Image: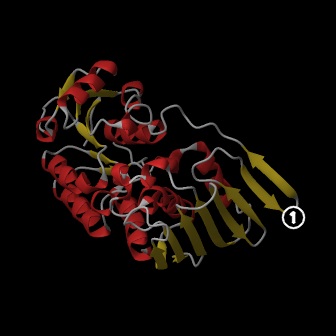
Amino acid sequence: MKFEKVRWGIIGCGDVTEVKSGPAFQKIKNSELVAVMRRTGELAKDYAERHHVPKWYDDADALINDPDVDAVYIATPPSSHKEYTIKVAKAGKPVYVEKPMALNFAECMEMIAACETFGVPLYVAYYRRVLPRFLKIKELLDHEAVGDVRFVSTTQYQKASEDVLDSKTIPWRVQPEISGGGLFFDLASHTLDLLDFLLGPIKDVQGFASNQAGYYSAEDIVTGTYRFESGIHGIGNWCFSAFEDVDMNEIVGSKGKITFSTFGNAPVVLTTANGTEQWSFEPPQHIHQPLLETIIADLTGGSNQCPSTGETGARTNWVMGKIV
């Protein structure tokens, strides 16, 4: 499947598409955003006018079947990812779907099967796989800067956000029927996918999930242990009702360690017997753009550059499902 220029449609032109992803489709060579869809037509129209998109819809099927749309970005909550992915695949069009890939691993496998059946590629929006800060960590690991990797630890906790403290404003991200779980599914998925990218697939998983604060029904604290196919061990703690915000990952090896955050801009720090080195990176304005560039290169050049596919995205859903 090869295009001279990829004409994109977006299903679900909400907040994530305003800066993080949407404008990138217009800025990348051989890419164009030609249509957007939102269930509320006025909001779709407003987005289209502000972002200079020629078409807007309030019906997803109409966008999917628009002959001017070559590929579709599904930017809805996870509860509709499977439905839309299968519809786009049946229409013979490539799929770029938000993370987490689906409500659960079984849905991920249905999405992969549909795309294979209809011969279309499936990409997942784990954009950190191509950001310079994480490519630097990958480079350090590939050059054995910490020797043989022994284990990785993740500590991520934060204060409860204002919107979850009021039962009338519970966000969809902590409604399992829409998101797959609590904030663990929304946020920890990024870290777990990164670990898959940096250290390889996880083989064995155990975990505990509880709701301690009672602000909503989904889990608000998760502890997991895992072993990678390579033999590396890992442990993670995520809490979403703590007294402050902490975001720290540590990869420990036989000769040193790498410390970094998943979401912040703190420097990547390498510590060895020779001392410490650190590297700072500014995120791109449109955080999806580097990953989208690899996808568009695949679709226009027939290459295989994109490192975030249905296969890798499904692995993260599998790990999260096992932990909780």
Compared to residue 24, the image places residue 95 above or below, namely below
Q: Is residue 169 left or right of residue 284?
A: left
- The answer to which quarter of the image holds residue 164 is bottom left
Quarter of the image with the C terminus is bottom left
| Residue 80 image offset from top left, x and y in percent | 23, 53
Q: Is residue 188 left or right of residue 100?
A: right
Q: Residue 187: percent from the left, percent from the top?
A: 48, 56
Q: Determine which residue is flagged by label 1.
A: 273
Q: Quarter holding the N terminus?
A: top left
Q: Position of residue 21 (x, y in %)?
A: 40, 36
Work out whether residue 78 or residue 134 is closer to the camera in this orientation and state it. 78
Q: Which amino acid does label 1 sit on?
A: Ala
Left or right of 50, for residue 293: right
**Residue 119 appears in the rendering:** no
Dot 1 crowding, Cα within 10 Å, few <14, some 14–19, many 20+: few
Observer able to see residue 65? yes
Q: Residue at x 25, y 64 (%)?
A: 107
Please give the count of numbered marks on the rendered protein: 1
> Residue 268 at what x, y percent from top left?
70, 50
Please give the name of the residue rendered at 22% of the width and 55% of the height, measured from the top-left corner.
115
Position of residue 191 relative to residue 91, above or below, is below
With respect to residue 117, does 10 lie above or below?
A: above
Task: State which quadrant residue 64 falls in.
Answer: top left
| Element type at mark 1 | loop
